[in-house]
Every structure is written in C-alpha cells, then in structure tokens.
Amino acid sequence: MAGARRYVPGDRLASIDWYASARESMVKDDDIFIVRQYYTETAPRLVLVVDRRPSLALYPPELPWLSKPAAIREATAAIVTAARAAGAYTGYLDFARRDANGEALPRWIAPRRQSVRAIAQIREGFTAPESSLELAMDYLLGLPSDVPAGTFVFAVSDYLQPIPDAIWARAHAQRWDLVPVIVQDPVWEQSFPEIGGIVLPVSDPATGKRSSLRLSAREARSRRDANRARLEGLVARFRRLGFDPVVLGTSDPVKIDTEFITWARRRRLRRRRAR
C-alpha cells in the first residue's frame, strides 16, 4: 500500500478498506468510505485523446499537403512509444463510434500497460461530432480512478473548432498534465497560399458536397493573416491556461519526434527555472 484516501465515484469497490471506513465513519458520525492506494497505481499514467471529426481526415495521401490521418498515426506512435519506455499505464479515447440512432459513443481503452497493442491498431473512423473534444473532457472527468491528478493527457486535434475556456479550466482544476497537440496543414491552415484570381474546387469534409471558390488577391492575403493569427492566438491561449502545446505540420516521423523532443526539453528547462 502507498496510502489511503476517501472514496470518490468511479473508484473500484474492491479497493475499499472496510475496517478503516467503519472506524472513520464512527469518528465522524457519518458514512465515510476509505480506499486503499497501491504503489502500482502511482506509475505514470497517460491518456491519448484523438479528435476524429471529419476535418481530421484531410488530406488524401496523394495530395501535396498534410495528411492529418498520417500525422495523427505517427504522433500517436511517438507518444505511445515514449509512454511504454517510461513504464506508463496508457489509455485512449475518441468519439468516432455511433449507436443505432447516430449518437456518438466513446471508444475508451483504460490506462493499462497491456493497452498499447490495442491503441496501435486503431486506424479507422473520422466521424466524431463537432463537440468531440468537449465530450472527451467530460468523459474523462467522470473517471477519477482511471484518470487521477497528474495524468498526462495528450489531446490531438486541429483545433479549428473553438473549444470554450471552461472546458480547459476544468481539466486544469483536475490537475492533469494536459498537452494539446495541434495538427494543422502549414499551407491551408497555418497560413494560406497566393491564389488570388484562381478558381478552386473545394468540398465539405463532413458531407462531401463540392463547390467552387474564387478569392481576390486581397482576400487571400487577409485569409493568410487570419490563419497565422489564429494559430499564434491558440498557442498563446494554451500557455496562458498553463498548457504547453505541440504544433505539428508534418507527417514525417523524424520531424514529429523532433517536435516532441523540443517540447520535452522546453518543459525540463521551464521546470528547472521554477525551482
């Protein structure tokens, strides 16, 4: 045993110390339940949350832009490999599954050492709703036993769908070590190309509906400035909330590893300065 604490919803009933609970209840004159904590439960924990909205399915590998599915796959592999090397319990969550009525369902793999193989096999499904990350945070907040304070939560998304600050504030209050992983195409999302006067075919990633788009040179410049400001503002916003994001604009595994190594070095340096 590493210690004991009060029961919270989600704890396993088998972990309740009935003798200590009875003694504490008698002293406090109330029904109080005490659960045991073991050293094996204090191993590093990591949960990988993947946003699988339709926009994360862009772009097909044959196009000369970022393939987000490939980037997600390589980022997942890098995170899981590092977690395995650290002996961490690793979990996974997305909302790409649907029931018979079309309602989004969680695909949840609880943090365990043996979960790595099941996580590595996840490929399909970019059908999550627009509120995918909000649903994921709410779901994790309801699992205090599986996702206790101190858990690393890597949240992978393009973050093009705005998320209320209240969601991140709740995650911060839970004392998770939240790491936003921002996956955006460097041409169309982190910036914007010079396409003034050119008619482009575009399609809606959710419905597949096709249409044509024509922007003036001025409109293209305005879109580029807005996209750059959006990314800069997103990174600044996360840092104000106490999170250090990782920005990915590539599916190259070596470059992705480099981004995570840079993040880890930045994190260590910040902690040394805080001492």
Image (cartoon, grey):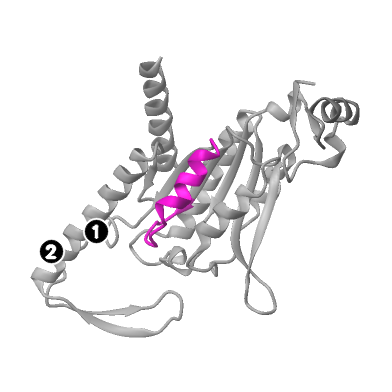
Image point 67% across, 28% down: which residue?
Answer: 43
* Mark 2 surroundings: few (<14), some (14-19) or many (≥20) residues within 10 A: some
Image point 39% across, 62% down: which residue?
Answer: 161
Instruction: Give above or below for 122 relative to 41.
Output: below
Q: Residue furthest right?
A: 19
Instruction: Give above or below for 81 relative to 207.
Output: above
The amino acid at mark 1 is Asn
Tell me: 29 left or right of 41.
Answer: right
Quadrant location, the N terminus:
top right
Q: Which residue is mark 2?
A: 221
Tell me: 236 left or right of 245.
Answer: left
Q: Residue 99 appears at what percent x and percent y?
A: 68, 73
Q: Residue 143 appears at what percent x and percent y?
A: 67, 46
Is residue 51 visible in this depiction of the protein? Answer: no
From the viewer's side, name the closer residue of 64 and 126: 126
Which residues fall within the magenta stretch?
156-175
The verdict on residue 166 being magenta is yes
From the viewer's side, name the closer residue of 94 and 138: 138
The amino acid at mark 2 is Arg
**What's the distance in space between the residues labelled 2 and 1, CA to CA?**
10 Å
Mark positioned earlier in the residue sequence (2 or 1): 2
Image point 44% across, 38% down: which residue?
Answer: 257
Q: Which residue is mark 1?
A: 227
Q: Quadrant of residue 77?
A: top right
Residue 148 is tagged as: none
Tell me the SS state at disc 2.
helix
Q: Residue 138 appears at what percent x and percent y?
A: 58, 54
Q: Residue 44 appears at what percent x and percent y?
A: 63, 30
Q: Quadrant of residue 65?
A: bottom left
Is residue 36 visible in this depiction of the protein? Answer: yes
Tell me the SS state at disc 1.
helix
Tell me: 56 left or right of 128.
Answer: left
